[in-house]
Image (spheres, coloured by chain):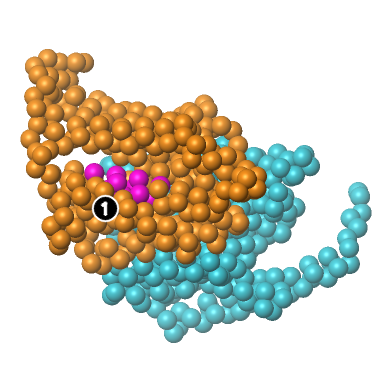
Amino acid sequence: MMERILDPLVVQRRREANVSFVVGFAIMVALFAVLPFVAYPVFLMQVLCFALFACAFNLLIGYVGLVSFGHALYFGWAGYLSAYAAKTWHVPPEVAILTGTATAAVLGIIAGGVAIRRQGIYFAMITLALAQMMYFFALRAPFTGGEDGIQSVPRGRLFGYFDLSNEMTMYFFVLVVVLAAFLLIYRIINSPFGEVLKAIRENEQRTISLGYNTDRYKLIVFVLSATLAGLAGSLKALVFQLASLTDVHWTMSGDVLLMTLLGGLGTVFGPVVGAFAVIAMQNYLAPFGQWVLVIQGVIFVVCVLVFRRGIIGELAHFLRVEL
Amino acid sequence: MFEIFGIPSQALFGQLLLGLINGSFYALLSLGLAVIFGMLNIINFTHGAQYMMGAFCAYLLLQYLGINYWAALVIVPIAIGVFGILIERLFLQHVRKLDHLYGLILTFGLALIIEGLFRNYYGSSGQPYQVPEALQGGRNLGFMFLPNYRAWVIAFSLVICLATWFAIERTRLGSYLRAATENPTLVRAFGINVPRMVTLTYGFGVALAALAGVMAAPIYNVSPQMGSDLIIVVFAVVVIGGMGSIMGAIVTGFVLGIVEGLTKVFFPEASNTVIFVIMVIVLLVRPAGMFGRTA
């Protein structure tokens, strides 16, 4: 075995990064453990699902620099399949969620295989077009329920024991799943695999010249991102007991981009904060109708022009730590 | 009355005509996208919103100022083009040096703002726009009925497309433009004001979208979301054609319109998705697009 020699400065920075992650994670867990007793659990579950969705999306945009404009595809279709499995096949919730997640993985392999053939701006357009294609499919396919969606999906009993129709049980189930996925994503970006991803983001040509098959790395991370987005979508379908066209529409892909950008691209906690901010905004501004669209647009413009680091990115920059 | 493959000729040619009409709009819009992308290296996500603004502008001019279609055909592209120039000066010029991704997100945000504002004031329902008097009615070609306005749209958009192609590929100004696309620094060294050219190019691309909007107003209902659905199809058209060539954008636009029309006749369920399916096939066979150059 070759001994790895690391620069002491690198070791120290890594240790600092670990400490800031542990502190951040502890704060996040504490907040989400207390919040359901003071806030509406369904709202918080919505935040958690979207936080996971945004984290999965950030894996792609923040760490590999691939802009997918069609992530609603995996989120929405996973929702459909898990809702369908729970309602029509009467499977327990854990199986329903696995069904949805597996669907997203398969879709990710197909769409990713096509999309990574082009770079940059084309990549974004292709993912968008593929998602739109599957949107039309969802609109027409008999089992998705068209405009009505799949309604009153049973939440069932988790492992045949925990009754998920209880809001609190459901909440803590969602929390555990989302936190586990969050840790998995953190593990991925700090693994040797994750380092290659960052190398691709910084300079793809150079990574290729170092002997890495970048297309394979891109496809793997694309599928991972799609799968985790699918997990989020499956959870959301059970939480709301509904799978509908809203979740596969391109506006959903825009929403998740907004959350990630607002929270901070390429930050660990950014997407969670972004999801919280955007969901809260959508809930509280709902009475103002179409102004939500305008405000979201303004946030996009402001983020791009003056606020490119996002909320957590700016905070990390201010505190001089990695978050 | 005769039949082709068991389909009455009226239906076949009718859908073919609709396909050509859609193709005219695909061609005009993807042409604008390609021109803008060539100079600014930005995919203009606001294109759909600017097309919608063109249609609304024509509608408002007629409704409140009594300005007719023909005048709108001139006024609207200029007005929206100037609006585009403002957008370029205010926003886009600041992201030129950044990653492509920011240009895309910025124009997406602008599209949301524009669409949201129009939805606030006009709701989601469509407003009708009268076909101009001179183009009302139609003629019977023996095998099908051809409404005059539709014939006009196809002919006029073809003329505009070819004129744009000529201006870019065959004139001195066009050669400056193409040179600035390849190497802006060198072109500046020859004393040509490249930033101004970039701004004007964006304005021109936006004006094309607005022109398409005015032409679309009498055919489709004028509604705030008319652009956002269309722009995604146009993106697929652009991916299929590849943004390397102007002619490529025009040809792909018309051909895909016709293909879509034919699909409506033979396999209606797939008519919404056929362009996306073609996109996937093209990507598998020729990743650079039909007319594209590999980057």
Instruction: Tell me which residue sits at (55%, 51%) in the image.
Output: B193
Left-right relation of A246 to A118 = left
- Which x, y percent locates residue A216? 65, 40
Left-right relation of A277 to B259 = right
Which chain, by letter, is orange? B
Subunit ID for the residue under disc 1: B
Q: Is residue B207 magenta?
A: yes
Residue position for label 1: B75
- Which x, y percent locates residue B43? 48, 49
Instruction: Tell me which residue sits at (52%, 28%) in the image.
Output: B286
Secondary structure under the numbered disc 1 in the rendered image? helix
- Which x, y percent locates residue B71? 20, 50
Q: Nearer the viewer, residue B288 or B69?
A: B69
Q: Is residue B100 shown to the viewer in this render?
A: yes
Instruction: Tell me which residue sits at (15%, 16%) in the image.
Output: B3
Q: Nearer the viewer, residue A75 or A323?
A: A323
Instruction: Tell me which residue sits at (15%, 61%) in the image.
Output: B65
Specify the amino acid type for callout 1.
Answer: Ile
- Which x, y percent locates residue A220? 62, 45
Q: Is residue A57 magenta?
A: no
Q: Is residue A131 shown to the viewer in this render?
A: no
Q: Which residues are magenta?
A: B205-215
* Few, some or many residues within 10 Å of mark 1 (<14, 14–19, 20+): some
**Image quadrant in which you'd find residue B97:** bottom right
B271 is higher (above) or lower (below) than A57: above
Which chain, by letter, is cyan? A
